[in-house]
Image (tube, rainbow, N blue to C red):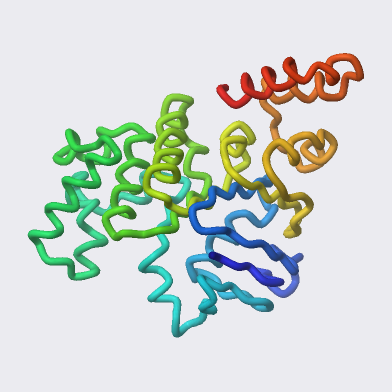
C-alpha cells in the first residue's frame, strides 16, 4: 500500500503551492488515475512518489515504510516510471540493450539478464524488435519497451506520467490494453497520471486535482457524473461520456436502468 499523508510542496517560495495538504492511498493491485489539467500538481505527485522531489510537509509511505533519503533507494527498486516523451526514455542503441540497462545497473548476472530480456520483451509483444533501433519504433512500441525494462526489474508498482499524451489512438489503445493485462494478469499496482478521461475511465479509482488540491475522488462512475466539476477542471469530456451524462441528467432517460447501463458500457468500450 502507498500512503500520501498531508503532503505539501512548492517549487519556489514566491509561487503558489504545487501541492497543498494532499492525502490519498493506493491499494496493492489497484489502478489509480490522477486527473487534472496542466499545473494541477499531477506530475509533482509522480516525482514525489519516486523521490525525485522531497515533500516539504507531510509523509509518503510504502507498506508502512516512510520514504526518506535513507529508504529511497530501496523503494525505487520496487517502483518503475514511464514518462511522457518516449524518446527521452531510450538509453540504448537498440531495444535489447535498453531493456538490459536497468538490470546491468542492478548487477544481474548475464545469463539471467538474457533470459529476462526474452521473457519480458515477449510479455509486451516486442520480442521481434530486440535488434531494432529506437527511431524505427512507434510511440506505443517505445512505451512498451520502457514497461518491459520495468518488469524485468520486478517492479510491483508502475507509474505512468502522461505516458499516452504523445501517442496516436492506436498507440494509446496498445498501452491501455497492456495496462489492463499488467493489472489483471500480473497484479501490478498502476498509478496513471493523465488528463485523458477516456483512459482514466478504465481505472479502479480516480483523484481529480486542481491547483494542487484534491477536489474529487472515487470510482470513475461516481466522479464522472459531476459535469460541473469536470468542466471547472478544464478536462476534455469525450463524446461517449457527454452522451451518458446528458442521459443521466434527463428525468425520463435516467429512469431506464437498462438504457443507462448500456450507455455506460458503450462509453467503456470507446
In the image, is 187 to the left or to the right of 191? left
Depth check: give the residue in front, 134 or 200.
Answer: 200
Residue 242: x %, y % from top left = 74, 23
Depth check: give the residue in front, 37 or 109.
Answer: 109
| Extreme residue toward the right, this view | 251
Residue 21 drawn above or below residue 264: below
Residue 69: x %, y % from top left = 47, 82
- Residue at x 77% of width, y 20% of height: 257
Determine which quarter of the picture holds residue 121. top left
Residue 95: x %, y % from top left = 21, 44
- Residue at x 67% of width, y 18% of height: 262
Quadrant for the C terminus in the image: top right
| Extreme residue toward the left, this view | 111
Residue 101 drawn above or below residue 202: below
In the image, is 176 to the left or to the right of 7? left
Quadrant for the N terminus in the image: bottom right
Depth check: give the residue in front, 237 or 266.
Answer: 266
Determine which quarter of the picture holds residue 198. top right
- Residue at x 62% of width, y 54% of height: 42
Q: Give the mark count.
A: 0
| Extreme residue toward the bottom, this view | 70
Residue 43: x %, y % from top left = 58, 56
- Residue at x 38% of width, y 43% of height: 185
Residue 169 drawn above or below residue 91: above
Amino acid at each position: 500500500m502507498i500512503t500520501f499523508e498531508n503532503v505539501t510542496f512548492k517549487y519556489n517560495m514566491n509561487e503558489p503551492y504545487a501541492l497543498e495538504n494532499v492525502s490519498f492511498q493506493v491499494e496493492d493491485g489497484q489502478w489509480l488515475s490522477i486527473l487534472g489539467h496542466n499545473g494541477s500538481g499531477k506530475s509533482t505527485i509522480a516525482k514525489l512518489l519516486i523521490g525525485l522531489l522531497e515533500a516539504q510537509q507531510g509523509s509518503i509511505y510504502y507498506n508502512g515504510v516512510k520514504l526518506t533519503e535513507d529508504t529511497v533507494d530501496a523503494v525505487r527498486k520496487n517502483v518503475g516510471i514511464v514518462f511522457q516523451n518516449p524518446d527521452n526514455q531510450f538509453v540504448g542503441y537498440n531495444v535489447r540493450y535498453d531493456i538490459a540497462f536497468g538490470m546491468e545497473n542492478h548487477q544481474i548476472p548475464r545469463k539471467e539478464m538474457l533470459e529476462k530480456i526474452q521473457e519480458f520483451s515477449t510479455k509486451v509483444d516486442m520480442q521481434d524488435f530486440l535488434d531494432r533501433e529506437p527511431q524505427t519504433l512507434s510511440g506505443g512500441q517505445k512505451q512498451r519497451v520502457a514497461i518491459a525494462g520495468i518488469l524485468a526489474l520486478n517492479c510491483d508498482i508502475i507509474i505512468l506520467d502522461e505516458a499516452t499524451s504523445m501517442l496516436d489512438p492506436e498507440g494509446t489503445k496498445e498501452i491501455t490494453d497492456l495496462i489492463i493485462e499488467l493489472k489483471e494478469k500480473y497484479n501490478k499496482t498502476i498509478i496513471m497520471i493523465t488528463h485523458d478521461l477516456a483512459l482514466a475511465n478504465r481505472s479502479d479509482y480516480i483523484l481529480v486535482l486542481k491547483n494542487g488540491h484534491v477536489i474529487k475522488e472515487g470510482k470513475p462512475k461516481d466522479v464522472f457524473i459531476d459535469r460541473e466539476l469536470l468542466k471547472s477542471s478544464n478536462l476534455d469530456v469525450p463524446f461517449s461520456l457527454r452522451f451518458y451524462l446528458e442521459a443521466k441528467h434527463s428525468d425520463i432517460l435516467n429512469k431506464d436502468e437498462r438504457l443507462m447501463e448500456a450507455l455506460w458500457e458503450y462509453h467503456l468500450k470507446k
